[in-house]
Amino acid sequence: MEDLIRVENLRKEFPVQKSFFDQLFAGKKKGFVHAVDDISFEIKKGEVLGLAGESGSGKSTTGRLLIRLLDPTSGNIYFEGENLADISSKDIQKFRSKMQVVFQDPNSSLSPRMRVGDAIGHPLKIHTDLGTEERKRKVMELMERVGLSPAEFLYYKYPHQLSGGQSQRVVLARALVTNPEFVVADEPIAMADVSVRAMILELMKELKEEFDLTYLFVTHDLSTAKYICDRIAIMYLGRIVEIGNTRELFDNPHHPYTKALLAAVPVPDPAQRRTEEIPRGEIPSAIDPPAGCHFHPRCRYATEACSKGRPKMKEVSPGHFSACILD
Amino acid sequence: MEQPILEVKNISIDYPISIGTVEAVRNVSFSLKEGESIGFVGESGCGKSTLGLSLLRLLRPPGMVVGGQMLYHGTDLLSLKEEEMRKLRGNNIAMVFQNPLTSLDPLYSIEDQFFETLKEHNPQITRQEAVERAGKVLEDLSIDKDRLYEYPHQLSGGMRQRIMIGLGLILNPDLLIADEPTTSLDVIVEAGFIDLLARLKKEYNISLILISHNLGLVAEIADRIAVMYGGMIMEIGEAGDIFARPMHPYTEGLIGCVPNIKMDQEKLASMPGSPPDLVTPPAGCRFSPRCPKVMDICREKTPVLQDYKNGRKVACWLYNEAE
């Protein structure tokens, strides 16, 4: 399969403001949050790549960088041969209809003053020269498809009149109305109730086949990632520590952090209570991350060598890479 | 048989609002033995949090208990005066909420918050005694004692939630109600927290009521599980048993629609429709409009929670009929 997106050495740093007094008297220099720290990967056409990790791991930032909602500090993002990291924010416009995003909270993604139909049709207004009637026809068709039916009834509703599941369907429909190729789904089901989650996940799977989509699925929930993703990249403090096919990654995790994450997932079955030990402590600050392998202070296999130098990505089995010196 | 620490009988809770009355909880009964943990699961609006709050009589108006009894060591909590109830809260029954940042006062150090809690229930206590006791509890929570002098914003999310548990435990209650205690935590921190909770439950010999939408989480810690829907208990029983053999179609749907990391799932179970409007709940079984196995009787008469076996109780006409 060909690559739809290729990311090379992507970095994003956010400056941290230190107060004037700190700079003057405490000798503190301006700091940076290393949100995304030199990562490379590719997304194949038609696949679902999962980005999983705890909060602060840089997974959402990566998603936003890929569709240039954020400008990278350095690195390349190739989309259909063009380097998105290089082109001006003006020229990025023409790519916008091809890459869309769905966020976690549908209610904060929808304008409370815009009717559902208008919200879904808005991207068409920006990106196409379709007439009002034609836009409406297209929106209604799509609404029926994503389960917002009867469309002629819901078309004129406002977001506050919808249920949580319906609002997330509106956001999905709005993302798909321009026939994009690539969709970044940033925790799209995190806010929804369990039964709604299942329906949204199923819908996303069906739509992917129907519309030939490629997803970047950002999630903290490995069970969900396992269910929907073809490949998964595990992130920790801005770096990818392991990436591979979902099945391979789950059956045969290499990086100690991946193992810890897997062990920590609560399983809805008391017969399968976990036994492995959970690492202590929490994810450290991304302003002054630990030297060497970022995970070493929490890792139970850590040796002295782990605090020196960033471990390289090694191919541990075909298509399965891990960044740990033990491999 | 040992005396249950808590026995809830036919509790109903209403929220009268302008357009009618929200029947938030209907005829809920359950009992909890000493040292036992029970998990309440269900989707938002099923009444699980309302039920938890009502046990401490912390329902916000217009919410009110309109019927039933809540016997705590034989005393009906509903019959207590507010003054007596105040003494009970913290000393006997403690509660931990979802978001520690909104439960901790940002202007007080952790030490102050412990001191204030202790002082509220024992006005004679000195600051030094309070610090000593707080220090001991922090030790149990694997938090460094020096953290006592810090403020909530200086602590990580997991640590804040552990402080909340500490504040709940410091008065040695025998019943702890935890309402979605890990929702704001990351997976690894959550796992650590659950282990801690299980350990504390043993060490402090407390009974636990865990309220959560997260089936996996409940499965990790609860001895028994009550599945709620539309303000009612649909099924209650031993945790392992419920997961292995869900009887109520809602329980079955709830378990089937959650991705399970230990299984290969082709398709998740779907539960079309949405939870009922509790101002005008559906006639008969409240799950009947969404139930895949619905029968005529389900739409007419409300099934009651009936004993099955192994302490399992189900409120469903599928089983009531068979008897």
Image (cartoon, rainbow, N blue to C red):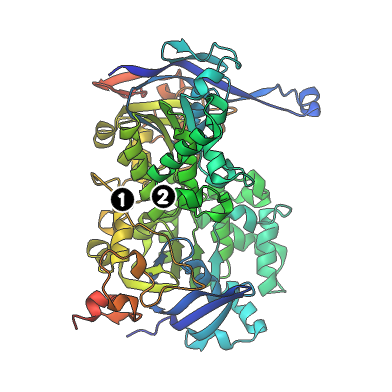
Asked which secondary structure carries label 2, the reply is: helix
Residue for point 23% across, 74% down: B318
Q: Is residue A161 left or right of residue B153?
A: left
Q: Position of residue B42 (x, y in %)?
A: 41, 63
> Is disc 2 in contact with disc 1, using a CB cutoff of under 8 Å?
yes
Q: Residue A205 is drawn in which quadrant? A: top left
Q: Secondary structure at mark 1?
A: loop
Q: Is residue A74 left or right of residue B304?
A: right
Q: Is residue B271 left or right of residue A294?
A: left
The N terminus of chain B: image quadrant: bottom left
Q: Which residue is under mark 2? A: B191
Name the amino acid type tagged 1: Arg
**Marks 2/1: CA distance?**
10 Å
Quadrant that contains the C terminus of chain B: bottom left
Please state the horizontal and vertical placement of residue B184, each as a whole percent of the image.
Answer: 52, 50
Residue B155, percent across and down?
Answer: 61, 46
Q: Residue B39 appears in which quarter of the rendering? A: bottom left
Q: Circle 2 marks a residue in which chain?
A: B
* Label 1: few (<14), some (14–19) or many (≥20) C-alpha neighbours in 10 Å: some
- The residue that disc 1 covers is A274
x and y percent of residue A161 in the render? 56, 55
Badge 2: residue crowd in 10 Å (few <14, some 14–19, many ≥20): many
Counting labels gives 2
Please say whether residue B315 is visible from this viewpoint. Answer: no
What residue type is disc 2 on?
Answer: Ala
Residue at image point 34% right, 81% down: B301
